[in-house]
Amino acid sequence: MRLPPLPDHAMTPAQRAAADELIAGPRKAVKGPFIALLRSPELLAHVQKLGAFLRFGTSLPVRVSEFATLLVARHWRQQFEWKVHVALALQAGTAQATIDALRDGRRPDTMDADETLVHDFCTELLAQHGVSETTWARTVARFTEAGAVELTGLVGYFAMVSMVLNVGHIPAEPGGDIAPLPVLPP
């Protein structure tokens, strides 16, 4: 790891306070991107609050949020986020065959209507850095303007988190039976 976990004795008071806030919240630990972000406790505090809203407070169904997160993790080849969110996507009802196709870099043919729309929105946003009027209108019709903005924010949040994890060389947590992402050409 380029940015390994900080031992308690090496933390500044601000880092300790940020770590304590994470441990007391829904994440229950300093792990994943927060290991790297702890180097900037003020940034960590803002990022974790944004992430808590985008993961636990939006108008989007959990299945939609988790599926979008998988699309971002796949795009950024981010093993930590992939491993965490595959389990959550399965719990939310995403089919294993859909996840397997994403893992392999294929467009799944097993997606339901919401997954198809989210796949179109996210892949277009990630590839084109925006979405067409048609994709926007379809997304707003299904999820409202607020939901479409929240979906955009979720993609941006997990892109940032993926970059932090990739730059920090933070590996996926050990254990579990979730297959890692294969390395695919860009």
Image (cartoon, rainbow, N blue to C red):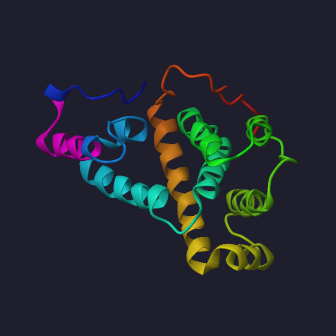
Instruction: Give the residue at x 76% y 64%.
Output: 117
Instruction: Give the residue at x 58% y 72%.
Output: 147
Viewer-side residue, 104 vs 130: 104
Residue 6 screen position, x and y as percent: 26, 29
Left/right placement of residue 89 relative to residue 14 reads right
Q: Is residue 38 magenta?
A: no
| On-image quarter of the C terminus | top right
Specify the quadrant of the image occupied by residue 104.
Answer: top right
Residue 62 screen position, x and y as percent: 57, 56
Viewer-side residue, 161 vs 27: 27
Viewer-side residue, 159 vs 94: 94
Left/right placement of residue 44 relative to residue 134 reads left
In this rendering, does residue 2 appear at all? yes
Residue 72 screen position, x and y as percent: 63, 49
Instruction: Give the residue at x 68% y 78%.
Output: 140
Q: Is residue 13 magenta?
A: yes
In this rendering, does residue 76 appear at all? no
| On-image quarter of the N terminus | top left
Left/right placement of residue 93 relative to residue 13 reads right
Q: Main secondary structure of the magenta part?
A: helix
- Tell me: residue 152, above or below residue 105: below
Instruction: Give the residue at x 71% y 29%.
Output: 183
Q: What residue range appears in magenta?
A: 10-22
Residue 15 screen position, x and y as percent: 20, 42
- Tell me: residue 173, above or below residue 88: above
